[in-house]
Amino acid sequence: MKKLDFFLLISGILEMVVCFYLLNKLTIFQFMFFAQILPSLLLALFMGRIASQMKKKWMLLVLSGIVYAGLMYILIKYTPMSTIEANTVQSASSVFEFNKNIQFGSYVGFFIQEIFLTAFVMLMVKVFNKIKLGAF
């Protein structure tokens, strides 16, 4: 594991710990960014870089999807959505509610999303490595 990979791993773990600590203070938009988008990108960057150096790439792609779907399950299960909705400033005419009762298909979507994102990062790393070597 290179220094950048280690940095991505530590920053992803630190980001999730801070996110869990600050859940009661987040608005819905901050929650979506810090609890869903940023972890997805950090995990894809980390797993994509590692998978680009391995022989069984598909195994890490599936693993990254499983990890992200599991992380989203835990996060959504323990998130105080009523507090997050109360922190979100809304106009009198807007109605914004988050339904915690998401179905299995949503987690399959998280799984597929992370596989595609990790595969894209893996492809970009391989292309950049070939360009560096002058073999592209």
Image: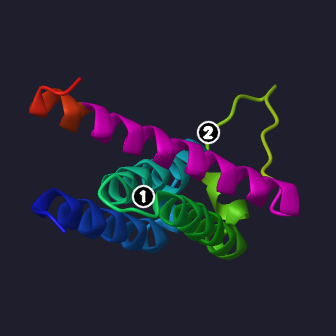
Q: What residue type is labelled 1?
A: Leu
Residue at image point 57% right, 51% down: 114
Residue 99 placement, left or right of 48: right
Seen from the viewer's position, the closer of residues 55 and 50 is 55
Q: Is 36 left or right of 1, judged from the image as shown?
A: right
The color scheme shown is rainbow
Residue 134 position, x and y percent, is: 12, 26
Residue in the image at 77% along x and 57% along y: 108
Residue density around tag 2, few if under 14, some if 14–19, many if 20 or more, within 10 Å:
few
Prevailing SS of the magenta stretch = helix
Instruction: Tell me, yes or no, whether the two marked residues, 2 and 1, touch with CB atoms within 8 Å.
Output: no
| Residue that badge 2 annotates | 89
Residue range in magenta is 99-127
Among the 4 quarters of the image, the one containing residue 135: top left
Q: Which of marks 2 and 1 is in front?
A: 1
- Residue at x 39%, y 45% (from the top left corner): 122
Q: Where is residue 127 in the image (x, y as percent from the top left)?
A: 29, 32
| Residue 43: mark in rendering | 1
Tell me the quadrant of the picture where the N terminus can be found.
Answer: bottom left
Where 72 falls versus 91 (above or below)? below
Rendered image quadrant of residue 62: bottom right
